[in-house]
Image (cartoon, grey):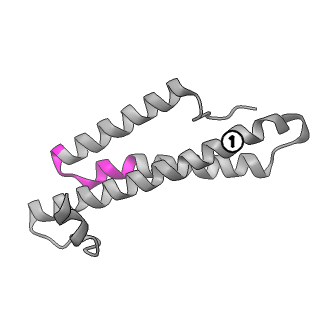
Amino acid sequence: MFIFNLTNPLTLLLVVLATALLIFLAQETKRSSIAIIPLIAYLALLITHVVQVSTLSEEFAYLSSTIFKSIAIDFLFILVTFFSYLWVDDLEAKKNNIKSIDNSLDWFWKEI
């Protein structure tokens, strides 16, 4: 059974670098559509891991702990990329003088 193992340090490092580069690109171009790419990817990865856990057969039971750790890492990346998306969306809204999707975090952005 193939799983995308996020507990492997090399894989984790590559995923962090790719995410950071996409968020940096979105921040530089001030386009929130670029920042949503990793968020959608991590949501799809979370769904994949949950389906794999729910359909795990007895012969692959040894993979359950790895998949559960990957699910925890998925949630962490979803949290980080969601806040990054909101931040870039706020930058884009200020650049284009339009209303942001969600202005409830204005107090947070002023502190950064």
Query: The residue tagged with tag 1: helix, strand or loop?
Result: helix
102 falls in the magenta region: no
| Number of marks in picture | 1
Q: What stretch is highlighted in magenta?
A: 28-37
Q: Camera-side residue: 40 or 86?
A: 86
Q: Position of residue 44 (x, y in %)?
A: 55, 50
Q: What's the amino acid at mark 1? A: Ile
Asked whether, in this view, residue 76 is left or right of residue 46, the answer is: left
Asked whether, in this view, residue 104 is left or right of residue 78, the answer is: left
- Seen as rendered, the residue at the extreme top is 10
To which residue does mark 1 refer? 67
- Seen as rendered, the residue at the extreme front is 111
Determine the residue positioned at 89% across, 34% down.
59
Magenta stretch mostly in which secondary structure?
A: helix
Q: Where is residue 9 in the image (x, y as percent from the top left)?
A: 53, 27
Crowding near the residue tagged with mark 1, few <14, some 14–19, many ≥20 C-alpha atoms within 10 Å: many
Q: In which quarter of the image is the C terminus?
A: bottom left
Q: Where is residue 92 in the image (x, y as percent from the top left)?
A: 17, 59
Q: Position of residue 61 (x, y in %)?
A: 84, 39
Q: Quadrant of the N terminus?
A: top right
Asked whether, in this view, residue 53 is left or right of residue 46, the answer is: right
**Residue 94, relative to residue 37: is it above or below?**
below
29 falls in the magenta region: yes
Determine the residue positioned at 21% across, 63% down.
109
